Amino acid sequence: MLKGLDPILTPELLSTLRAMGHGDEIAIVDANFPAASSGPPVIRLGGVPADAVAHAVLSVMPLDDFVPEAAWCMAVVDDPEADPPIFDGFREALARHETAEFTLNKVERFAFYARVSACFAVVSTGERRLYGNLILKKGVVRTN
């Protein structure tokens, strides 16, 4: 254990977050997502909700504020305007850990799969709520 770090941040996840560079993306996906066949390395956090992982990741990783979008979720199939409850958890994590205002952008299912395949890594959670999938683009840590 380390002081001040969320215990969800395993050594493997911390190493991955540290290895990522500006503009790299990480996917946090639910238990139904085909993580193993998506391509990038998979970090397994079974039993942990996706929004809890989002909070943990965002507690140490800045989002990219050089681009218009830095956070994406999977749009509901056949109802892209729908807003499943898990989306509120993702929005709360964004608002709590970022000083800039970031929106949660929706991406069509197959476009989301394609974007995940280009991610630096995938965090496969135990999330059982549908549409518990999120992609985050890493930003920079600013110094004074």
Image: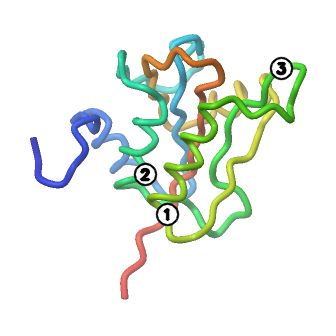
Q: Secondary structure at mark 1?
A: loop
**CB under 8 Å between discs 3 and 1:** no
Image location (x, y in percent) of residue 69: 71, 56
Residue 136, compared with residue 113, is above or below; it is below
Q: Measured from the top left, where is residue 109 in percent x and y? A: 78, 24
Q: Which mark is residue 58?
A: 2
Q: Which residue is mark 1?
A: 98
The amino acid type of the residue labelled 1 equals: Glu
Q: Residue flagged by tag 3: what amino acid is it?
A: Val
Alpha carbon separation for disc pair 1 and 2: 8 Å
Of residues 123 and 101, the one drawn nearer to the viewer in this rendering: 101
Residue 68 in the image, given as x and y percentages of width and height: 73, 63
Question: How far apart are the two marked residues, 3 and 1, measured between alpha carbons?
Answer: 29 Å
Height in image: 125 above or below 86?
above
In-image side of 25 versus 47 (left or right) = right
Q: Secondary structure at mark 3?
A: loop
- On the image, the x and y values in percent for residue 42 come to 43, 22
Label 1 close to label 2 by CB (< 8 Å): yes
Q: What residue does disc 3 label?
A: 77
